[in-house]
Amino acid sequence: MTQPVPAHQPTLYEALEALPEGVVGEILNGQLHTQPRPAIPHAHVAARFDRSIGRSYGDGIDGPGGWWIFPEPEVHFVRDVEVAVPDLAGWRRERMPILPTDHRVEVVPDWVCEILSPSTTRKDRETKMPLYAQYGVRHAWLVDPAKHTLEVYQLDAGAWVEIGRFADAGQVAAPPFEAVSIDLEGLWLLQQPRLVGR
């Protein structure tokens, strides 16, 4: 009597790859985390950073160049096992001179930026920041569009040290991108007033 063939149990990465369009998946500490595409205030901050930092450090048009800057890259700290998708990430070109040919990036970023939202703040702070430190990311920024804040962290002896906290308006030049002056006020969208009865 033949034994039934056990059904294939998809790996976490296969489950991640099978997510529907518009859903972002990450594998963090052995668990699959999913979230929808970001809201407009979140996307606005990412686009502003991508333009200012990417133009200066990625393209070298208004700054020193020497970096690759990507929105939402799929970073494999351990291939198909520990997978993070930062809102933005950057690599010094001397550390990653040649870009990967598929969607996986297996070189640890030099900088990551997470844009906080009510549904991601806890994961970003309590799960992803320790993982970024564990794998040796040198710089991390946390941006909160609702609170109008930018927090800048640097890795020191395996632990994050806050080296700057900025709020509301003003120009900010923060490591590792000191050549770029970021207009904080330009990051925050004006909140539309709610119409009565809506």
Image (cartoon, grey):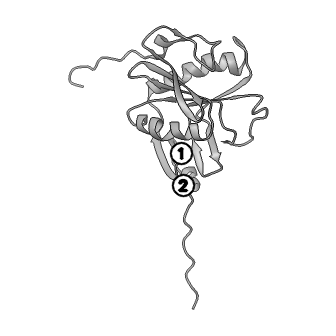
* 103 to the left or right of 143: right
> From the image, which quarter does the N terminus lie in?
bottom right
Q: Quadrant of residue 60?
A: top right
Residue 103 picture location, percent across and down:
67, 42
Q: Residue at x 78, y 29 (%)?
A: 94
Whether 90 is drawn above or below 59: the answer is below
Q: Quadrant of residue 108?
A: top right
Whether 12 is drawn above or below 72: the answer is below
Residue 91 visible at all? yes
Whether 183 is drawn above or below 95: the answer is above
Q: What kind of element bears circle 1?
A: strand
Q: Amino acid at mark 1?
A: Glu
Q: Quadrant of residue 121?
A: top left
Residue 128 picture location, percent across and down:
51, 39
Q: Which residue is mark 1?
A: 26
Q: Which residue is mark 2?
A: 15
Residue 57 picture location, percent across and down:
69, 19
